[in-house]
């Protein structure tokens, strides 16, 4: 985990954390897109991508296998089966010249792709 991510880490009651920048950007998106009641942030993993698995980040309703936790006032859903791959992951938001968008610092990843959107564990 980078020192910057460590310093800006928001406390979480669940397996995934958000930096202050990521939480701020998620709140902006929720406000701008008028996310409907019952929809919350979903973090997950799915098969695919150049390294074998891709990250999921979006808004969704709760599903049967989900756990729900809160990060800095943001309700988060995650399929409990994804915990094996995502435990300890920190989601950050970059807004610079070199990179823009959400990034994932995953201690379980044994390899990642160049764009940072897929991994293997």
Image (spheres, grey):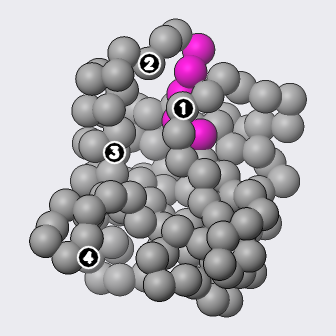
Callout 4 crowding tier (Cα within 10 Å): few <14, some 14–19, many ≥20 = few
114 on left or right of 118: left
Nearest to the observer: residue 54 or residue 92: 54
Above or below: residue 19 compared with residue 32: below
- For the residue labelled by badge 1, is the local secondary structure a helix, a strand or a loop? strand
102 on left or right of 50: left
Kindly report the distance in space between the C-alpha atoms of the residues bearing marks 4 and 2.
Answer: 30 Å
Quickly name the residue at label 1. 59
Kindly report the distance in space between the C-alpha atoms of the residues bearing marks 2 and 1.
Answer: 8 Å
Residue drawn at x 33%, y 51% is 22
- For the residue labelled by badge 3, is the local secondary structure a helix, a strand or a loop? helix
Residue 77, x across and y down, in percent? 64, 37
Q: Locate residue 48: give its quadrant.
A: bottom right
- The magenta-colored residue range is 38-42
- The first of marks 4 and 2 along the sequence is 4
Q: Which mark is residue 4?
A: 4
- The first of marks 1 and 4 along the sequence is 4
Q: Locate residue 118: give its quadrant.
A: bottom right
- The first of marks 4 and 3 along the sequence is 4
């Amino acid at each position: 985990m980078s020192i910057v991510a460590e310093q800006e880490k928001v406390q979480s009651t669940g397996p995934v954390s958000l930096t202050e920048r990521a939480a701020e950007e998620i709140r902006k998106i929720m406000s701008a897109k008028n996310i409907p009641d019952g929809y919350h942030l979903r973090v997950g993993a799915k098969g695919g991508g150049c390294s074998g698995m891709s990250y999921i980040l979006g808004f969704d309703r709760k599903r049967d296998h989900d756990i729900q936790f809160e990060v800095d006032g943001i309700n988060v859903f995650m399929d409990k089966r994804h915990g094996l791959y995502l435990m300890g992951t920190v989601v950050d938001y970059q807004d610079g010249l070199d990179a823009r968008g959400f990034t994932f610092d995953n201690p379980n990843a044994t390899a990642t792709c160049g764009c940072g959107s897929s991994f293997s564990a």
